[in-house]
Structures are given as structure tokens and as C-alpha cells.
Image (cartoon, rainbow, N blue to C red):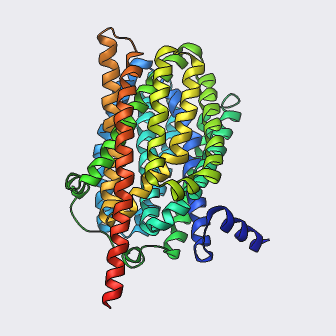
């Protein structure tokens, strides 16, 4: 049975025998991390509406401040601790935070409950980006660029299945019991994630420097920022991320406005968001199994990075003309499916051709601070358009041309990644001949 499973994996993914254990551990790690997040994501989105849609720009501002405060602490961890220590530590630290929210959620009522909902929204937004950024940084450190193109799509299946399980669980139970009682599930899964990461550290496939460089990276607290500023390639990735988050925030605000009008009850909103997540993750896993690896291997990273912006150009033009609940739901499903199924794995491949410092420090800065800066730009642009009397739909018409720029940048980044790989292969061949 085991041999048949390995043979099936080799046919589906193109995985080599020596990579199978690492592939399965990476899938299990991603499954645990994203299930833990997917269980609480609908609760976060429902809590975001506790104070009304007008609260959202301030919640996004608070999230950016929290992210900027957390990044130097993370950089200090990476600089001083071996990866097997800080990867496990972050999972367990966030698990303890969830336990605290559970206790406070059962105690606080009235106005205190509203403030707890706001804090939970900010915390969950920080938690989401940090644990997933560390997950993909870890994998980019373990796998080579060639391995990443073959395997990252399938590894992302574990992440997506985790999303299906987590959102499905919340969807079934949110109307029957207080969603707070789902928090212990997230805590347990984060402990599983820490243990899977420990197993991956022992496997150590891919980069030779990764298998020997088990100490801290060293360097200063601001090295992530300076590394990004000093590299046109990393700056372009940051710009790609910025355009993604600005357009995602426009869509999120439009969704919040439509959903708040369609559903008055927090349980109904939570169930709606959970069903949306379930549909997204179900479609995503099909793409990741049957399309992601094949597409990146045959057409390259540039194609995978450009498809989502192309979809968004069409989607925002449609939404600007028909801002209905059906239109918002359909666009969110397609956009998020394309992001998780193609764009996210392709974006992570971009980091396999940079240094370890860039993989952990610069990548984390882009994945967290730059990501939330895009949220801020999108949130306050949306608010200013509302104050100017332009209406919320103006954001859709602004997002469409931004998506065109985003598409062009995605094509350029994909080509640069392929060029860097070719240069690295040529250099390695020259060194081999020199010996």
C-alpha cells in the first residue's frame, strides 16, 4: 500500500523517492497551520463588523502598528535562534495567545466584549501573516528552486485541505454553539504544526547552506528592511504584494458593506463567511493537485503570477457595474481560489533564488509590514472616497487599472526569477568544470 502511494505521488507530482518524506511532512505542517487559522478566520471577520463597517479603517491601522511592532521582535528571534527553535516557538506562542482570548471571551460582556472583538481582529491578522510567512520562508530555505516548482503546488494542497477542514468545522458549528469554543482546536493544531516543523528540520532537503546553517542568521533588527531597499528584485516583490493587498482590501470593504446589509446576526455572518471559505478551499485543492505544478513547470512562474491580476481586471469591472451579494461572493471565490491555487505558490518560488537573510528577514517584512501597508492604503483610500461622496463602488473602478500594473509586474518578476535560476545553474556548472 505504501509503495502504491509513493508511486501515485511520483506520477502526480514528479517527486523523487528521497523527497517523499519531506513532502509529506511539509503538507502536514501546512495542514495544521492553516486549519488552525481557518477555524478562527470566520470569527475574526464576524467580529470585524461588531462596531460597524466604519470601524474597519481603524482596525486596519491598528493592525499595521501591531505588525510594525512585531517585526523587530521576529527579526531578533531569527538573528539569534536556530530555525528549529524559532519556528516551533512562534507556533506555541500564538497557541498561548488563543488560550488567553478564550478565557477573556468568556468573561467580558458589553462594551468590553466589543473592545475584545477589535483586539481579536488585529491579533488574528498578525497571527495569520506571521505563521504563514514563517511556513513558506522555512520551505524556501529547505527546497531548491527546481524542487519548489515541482513540489510547492502539492505542498499547498495540505494548506488548502486545512482550510477546508477548518472552515467546514466552523460552518457546521457556528450556528449551534458559541464560536469561542472552537479556539482550543486551533491551539492543539498549532502544537501539531510545531512538531511537524521539527521533523522537517531533521530531513533538511534542498539547499546545502540550509542543512549546515542551523545557527541564528545574525545581523541587525532592521536588516529585513535594508535588504529589501537594496535589491530591485525584492522591491519589485514588495510592489507586487502592495498591489495585491490594496485591491484585496477594496474587495474586502465592498464585501463587508454588502454582507452587513444582507445579514444582521453575527452567527449568520460567521456561517456565510465559513461557507465562502469552504467553497474557495474546495476549488483551490483541485487546482493545486491537477494544475499548479504542471503550469509552473510548463509555462513558468510568470504565467502563474499574471493570471490573478488578469482575473481581477475583469472582476472589478463587473463588480463596479453589479455590486450584489452574488457578485461579491463569486468574485471572492474566484480571486481567492486563484491566489491560493496559483499566485501564492508561485510567489513563494521567487524566494528560492535569494539569500537566507532575504528568505527569512526581507520576506517576513514584505509578508507582514508591506502587506499591512497595502491594507492601510486601500482602507483609507476607501474611506476618503466615501467622504468625497464618490461612493464605495469607486474603489472597484480604481482597482481595475491597478490590476493592469500588477499584471505587468508579475510577468517581469517571473522572468527575473527564471533568469536568476539560469545564472545560478551556469555558475555552478562553471565551478564544477573548474574543479
Instruction: State the residue in front, 230 or 41.
Output: 230
- Residue 303 in view here: yes
User: Number of labelled discs?
Assistant: 0
Q: Which residue occupies 65% across, 52% down?
A: 290
Compared to 339, does 178 lie above or below? Answer: above
Q: Which residue occupies 31% across, 50% down?
A: 365
Instruction: State the residue in front, 58 or 92.
Output: 58
Left or right relative to 132: residue 324: right
Q: Which residue occupies 61% across, 66% down?
A: 14
Left or right relative to 323: residue 85: left
Where residue 148 sits in the image (x, y, percent)?
49, 63
Where residue 382 sits in the image (x, y, percent)?
35, 21
Compared to 96, does 268 lie above or below? Answer: above
Quarter of the N terminus within the rendering: bottom right
Residue lying furthest right in this view? 1
Where residue 409 sits in the image (x, y, percent)?
34, 43
- Residue 72 in view here: no
Instruction: State the residue in front, 196 or 255.
Output: 255
Q: Which residue occupies 47% across, 63% down?
A: 139
Amino acid at each position: 500500500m505504501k509503495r502504491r502511494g509513493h508511486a501515485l505521488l511520483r506520477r502526480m507530482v514528479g517527486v523523487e523517492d528521497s523527497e517523499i518524506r519531506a513532502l509529506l511532512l511539509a503538507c502536514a505542517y501546512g495542514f495544521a497551520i492553516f486549519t488552525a487559522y481557518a477555524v478562527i478566520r470566520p470569527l475574526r471577520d464576524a467580529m470585524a463588523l461588531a462596531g460597524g463597517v466604519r470601524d474597519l479603517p481603524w482596525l486596519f491601522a491598528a493592525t499595521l502598528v501591531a505588525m510594525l511592532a512585531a517585526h523587530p521582535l521576529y527579526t531578533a528571534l531569527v538573528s539569534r535562534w536556530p530555525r528549529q527553535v524559532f519556528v516551533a516557538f512562534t507556533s506555541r506562542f500564538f497557541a498561548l495567545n488563543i488560550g488567553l482570548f478564550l478565557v477573556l471571551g468568556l468573561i467580558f460582556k458589553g462594551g468590553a466584549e466589543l473592545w475584545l472583538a477589535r483586539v481579536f481582529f488585529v491579533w488574528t491578522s498578525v497571527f495569520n501573516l506571521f505563521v504563514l510567512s514563517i511556513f513558506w520562508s522555512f520551505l524556501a530555505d529547505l527546497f531548491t528552486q527546481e524542487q519548489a516548482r515541482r513540489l510547492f503546488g502539492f505542498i499547498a494542497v495540505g494548506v488548502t485541505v486545512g482550510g477546508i477542514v477548518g472552515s467546514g468545522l466552523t460552518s457546521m458549528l457556528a450556528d449551534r454553539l458559541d464560536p469561542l469554543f472552537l479556539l482550543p482546536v486551533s491551539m492543539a493544531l498549532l502544537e501539531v504544526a510545531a512538531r511537524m516543523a521539527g521533523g522537517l528540520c531533521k530531513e533538511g532537503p534542498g539547499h546545502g547552506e540550509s542543512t549546515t546553517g542551523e545557527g541564528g542568521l545574525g545581523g541587525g533588527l532592521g536588516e529585513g528592511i535594508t535588504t529589501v531597499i537594496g535589491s530591485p528584485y525584492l522591491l519589485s516583490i514588495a510592489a507586487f504584494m502592495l498591489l495585491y493587498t490594496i485591491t484585496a482590501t477594496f474587495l474586502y470593504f465592498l464585501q463587508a458593506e454588502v454582507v452587513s446589509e444582507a445579514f444582521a446576526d453575527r452567527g449568520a455572518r460567521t456561517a456565510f463567511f465559513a461557507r465562502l471559505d469552504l467553497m474557495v478551499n474546495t476549488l483551490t485543492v483541485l487546482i493545486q493537485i491537477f494544475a499548479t505544478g504542471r503550469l509552473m513547470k510548463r509555462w513558468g512562474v510568470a504565467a502563474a503570477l499574471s493570471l490573478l491580476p488578469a482575473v481581477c481586471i475583469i472582476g472589478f469591472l463587473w463588480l463596479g457595474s453589479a455590486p450584489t451579494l452574488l457578485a461579491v461572493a463569486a468574485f471572492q471565490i474566484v480571486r481567492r481560489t486563484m491566489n491560493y491555487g496559483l499566485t501564492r505558490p508561485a510567489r513563494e518560488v521567487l524566494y528560492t533564488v535569494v539569500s537566507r537573510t532575504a528568505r527569512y528577514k526581507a520576506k517576513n517584512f514584505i509578508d507582514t509590514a508591506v502587506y499591512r501597508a497595502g491594507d492601510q492604503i486601500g482602507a483609507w483610500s476607501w474611506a476618503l472616497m466615501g467622504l468625497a461622496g464618490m461612493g464605495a463602488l469607486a474603489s472597484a473602478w480604481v482597482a481595475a487599472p491597478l490590476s493592469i500594473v500588477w499584471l505587468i509586474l508579475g510577468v517581469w518578476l517571473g522572468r527575473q526569477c527564471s533568469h536568476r535560476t539560469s545564472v545560478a545553474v551556469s555558475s555552478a556548472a562553471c565551478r564544477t568544470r573548474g574543479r
